[in-house]
């Protein structure tokens, strides 16, 4: 497999920008892996099809507000090429420094990151979070609350969850939440810093951002305001930006991600049920459309997923079947562009196949 190493993709976004040697030094940060990232190629410089894909700016180690000039320069470039997809800035920095004398003609979205409390484990503050909420409400841009990671017995109490929900109600926005994702690098750093976080339900920390059932129940019990609450950022952005489906096609895993209680349920399921036997987008792999019931995810079959959900073994609907080995990022791109999920042999990688490059 010939990969293209000059563009980087996360789970929900193509990521452009730079890492910094310093950030807010949150103890739980998995981005602090000592890698030096610099990715500046724009989506349509790779392929004209990428004009509508979701972009995240400076989501590497180093908050976008700690490198404001760089952030603004990248937004200028995205505006200049007429990028149409959502553009996300996740920040716990001081948004009052962001210039409002120029309104960017892109679908810009501010994800306001919060730990929910002032804590020695977190580099942000609730005071700055409140200031950022007030700023975004008056900015004219789209915004939402990123409440993460929720860590057992630290920021998982009813009082904290109720406060975040009440703030979402006050500032008329939605919430995305998740648990702690622990890479091998983070596991080692926590050990070196003598920090021992407790998992939910004795669930081993790993790449899945597991949150205990007790926390999910608390969100349901505390949500007297009927605030839209999501377990996935892409689902939250789908709702915020009035899209017709979740770009990551989480509707193939409805029980795992809480589709039945999601305000996007009707739109997403309608889209999935209307998928056809032909694609209206050219993807650079030989494929066929197959209709499957109770399909088992390739990662589970390969034994690389420690905690599969019920949905991992019961994927149902039309799938794109590809015989070639591809990367998980190739799969993401196909989901973003088509709305189908993929049946293929794939390797975990933040890079795409060179076949995409036009």
Image (cartoon, grey):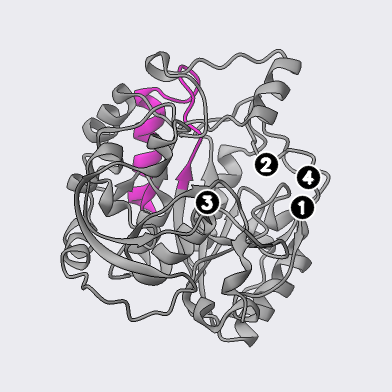
- Where residue 225 sits, quadrant-wise, is top left
Tell me, yes or no, whether the two marked residues, 2 and 3, touch with CB atoms within 8 Å: no
Q: Which residue is mark 2?
A: 31
For mark 2, give the secondary structure.
Answer: loop
On whether residue 159 falls in the magenta region, the answer is yes
- The local crowd at label 2, few if under 14, some if 14 to 19, many if 20 or more residues have their Cα within 10 Å, is some
Q: Which residue is mark 4?
A: 35
Quarter of the image for the C terminus: give it: bottom right
Q: Residue at x 67, y 36 (%)?
A: 123
Q: CA distance from mark 2 to mark 3?
A: 17 Å
- The local crowd at label 4, few if under 14, some if 14 to 19, many if 20 or more residues have their Cα within 10 Å, is few
Q: Which residue is mark 3?
A: 112
Q: CA distance from mark 4 to mark 1?
A: 8 Å
Q: Which residue is mark 1?
A: 19
Q: CA distance from mark 2 to mark 4?
A: 9 Å
Tell me, yes or no, whether the two marked residues, 2 and 1, touch with CB atoms within 8 Å: yes
Mark nearest the camera among 4 and 1 is 4
Taking depth in this image into account, of 225 and 51 the one nearest to the observer is 51
Taking depth in this image into account, of 105 and 292 the one nearest to the observer is 292
Mark nearest the camera among 2 and 4 is 4
Mark nearest the camera among 1 and 3 is 1
């Amino acid at each position: 497999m010939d990969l293209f190493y000059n563009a980087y993709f996360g789970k929900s976004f193509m990521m452009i920008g730079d890492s910094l040697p310093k950030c807010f030094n949150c103890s739980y940060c998995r981005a602090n892996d000592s890698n030096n990232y610099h990715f500046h190629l724009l989506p349509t410089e790779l392929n004209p099809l990428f004009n509508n894909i979701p972009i995240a700016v400076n989501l590497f180690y180093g908050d976008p507000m700690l490198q404001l000039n760089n952030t603004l320069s990248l937004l200028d470039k995205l505006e200049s090429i007429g990028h149409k997809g959502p553009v996300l800035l996740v920040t716990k920095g001081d948004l009052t420094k962001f210039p409002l004398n120029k309104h960017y003609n892109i679908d810009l979205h501010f994800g306001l990151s919060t730990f929910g409390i002032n804590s020695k484990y977190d580099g942000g503050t609730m005071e700055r979070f409140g200031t950022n909420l007030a700023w975004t409400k008056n900015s004219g841009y789209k915004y939402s609350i990123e409440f993460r990671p929720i860590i057992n017995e630290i920021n998982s109490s009813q009082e904290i969850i109720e406060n975040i929900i009440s703030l979402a109600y006050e500032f008329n926005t939605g919430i995305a939440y998740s648990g702690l994702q622990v890479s091998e690098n983070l596991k080692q750093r926590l050990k070196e810093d003598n920090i021992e976080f407790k998992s939910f339900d004795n669930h081993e920390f790993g790449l899945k951002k597991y949150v205990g059932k007790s926390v999910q129940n608390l969100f349901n019990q505390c949500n007297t305001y009927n605030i839209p609450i999501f377990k996935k950022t892409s689902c939250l952005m789908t709702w915020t930006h009035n899209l017709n489906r979740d770009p990551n096609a989480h509707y193939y895993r409805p029980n795992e991600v809480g589709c039945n209680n999601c305000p996007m349920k009707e739109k997403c399921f309608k889209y999935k049920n209307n998928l056809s036997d032909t694609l209206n987008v050219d993807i650079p792999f030989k494929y066929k459309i197959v209709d499957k019931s109770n399909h088992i995810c390739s990662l589970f079959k390969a034994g690389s997923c420690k905690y599969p959900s019920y949905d991992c073994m019961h994927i149902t609907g039309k799938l794109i079947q590809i015989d070639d080995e591809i990367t998980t990022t190739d799969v993401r791109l196909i989901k973003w562009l088509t709305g189908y999920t993929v049946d293929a042999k794939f390797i975990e990688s933040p890079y795409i196949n060179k076949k995409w490059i036009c």
